[in-house]
Amino acid sequence: MRGARRHSSTSGRLVTRMITAYAATRCRRGRVGMDLTCHARRGCRSVTPVAAAPRDPWLDNTKMVLVMLVVIGHSIGLVESTTGSHWLYDFIYLWHIPAFVFISGYLSKSFEWDRRRMKNLLYTLAVPYLLFEPALYYFRVGVVDEHEPGLLWLNPHWTMWYLVVLLMWRLATPILKLHWLFLPLSVIVSLVGGLWDTDVLMIPRFLGLLPFYVLGLHLKPRHLRHLDDVWVRVASVPMLVGIAVMAFYTDTWARTALLWYDAGYDEIPIDNEIVFQTRLTVMGVGLLGAFAAMSLVPRRSLGWFTRMGTATLVVYLFHGFIIKTAKALGWEDFTAAHEVLGLVLTVVGAAVLALVLASPPVRRVLEPLTNPLGWLEARRASARRAATPSDPTSAAPRSAGPSPAPLPRAGSALPLPDEPGATAPVPPVVGGGADDPGFPRAAGSGERRGHESTP
């Protein structure tokens, strides 16, 4: 009996060493799966099995709702002469830009100045900006025959402003999240930012919308859970109704230009004595409207709609080409002749456009264009995994005992104990925890002026 126990213990330790060595090898080759965390303190020797963090369906639902409003807001520029379009436009832009910026900040908490996140920043924001800024500019100038002033890349055109502004916010994140005092400081910066009248890198928007981003950085999940409180949801409906009423009189108590956060105070016909107060009021209304709308978004998974919330970057980058194509085909003439019908069809069509762009078939085709370097890297990694020998245990020491359960093929994840087929024990945890989750893709949009100038 003792010999059998010793033999079983020896076999168990051997299996554990084999699993640890296999996972460490994959870590050195950059092939650790979602369920393994490698700690690189001592030559990548310690491996901790961790479960992949589940996605929050509420966040995906919220992102999909907001990006749909982005497309609707930009499409209203096609029906600018239609009765009711200005009210709808002001109502959407009073709160949906603050909501989008807040979500971007909330999802950027894990950003640090490390190699992995800086590389991700390059792949998902910098490269798309460098590619889509000239693509959309020349499409508008050459196909739609629009005149666009400003220098490429230095003066972001139309929807491209959000990419470069989010890039700058992300780079400042490690500092902005150090202390909550950066939140009141960001409000002061936003108010003073209205004195800056330039389109270079959209600095006015970087400064003006900063409080919503910083608020997202500092609020925690326990704070957002209060949006589920019954009284909050009950109060959200009259709150949005009140904002809708305020949108009828935007030019009475403020100006539409203040909703874009890109116009200097010199461009806004408001007395200097009250311009700061007016901007602060617009920010407060935007924050209340953002939280009211987000409290009404379902927390549970909505199936296909929730899954589409992971494709907001595709919607953001490509919807402008479709809207400008509709303009080139004469949609504005149709809406001028049929005002009510034109407005309804434009809004419904914009919502459908967002859903189509986020649908799995379209997303599979367009997603490589939004992150070409990441797509090429993934293809190379897949080719390397296919060329790797399928038996990673060939170099393991031989044992006189019974053969252990076979390890997964190279490139696959090690099974967890509670999964089918998980016969091998999981190696013990040695120091450290799970890595920070990778920061999400940016979502949002915007333009430069008027119905065609906001996110």
Image (tube, rainbow, N blue to C red):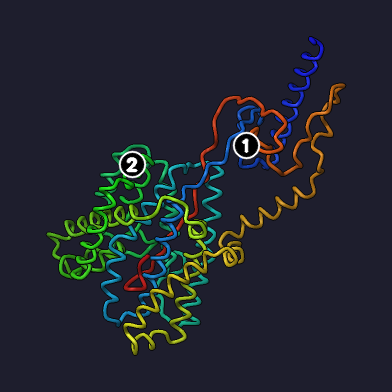
Q: Where is residue 19 in the image (x, y as percent from the top left)?
A: 72, 31
Q: Where is residue 64 in the image (x, y as percent from the top left)?
A: 44, 60
Which image quarter: residue 209?
bottom left
Disc 1: which residue = 36
Q: Which amino acid does label 1 sit on?
A: Leu
Q: Around disc 2, counting alpha carbons within 10 Å, would you say few (fewer than 14), some (14 to 19), or many (20 or more)? A: few
Which image quarter: residue 29?
top right
Quadrant where the C terminus sits is bottom left
Residue 432 shows in the view = yes
Name which residue lies at 83% across and 32% down: 395
Quadrant where the N terminus sits is top right
| Whether residue 218 is situated above or below residue 298 in the rendered picture | above
> Could you tell me how many numbered marks the image carries?
2
Q: Residue 407 carries which label?
A: none
Sequence-earlier tag: 1 or 2: 1
Disc 2: which residue = 223
Near-viewer residue (71 or 238) = 238
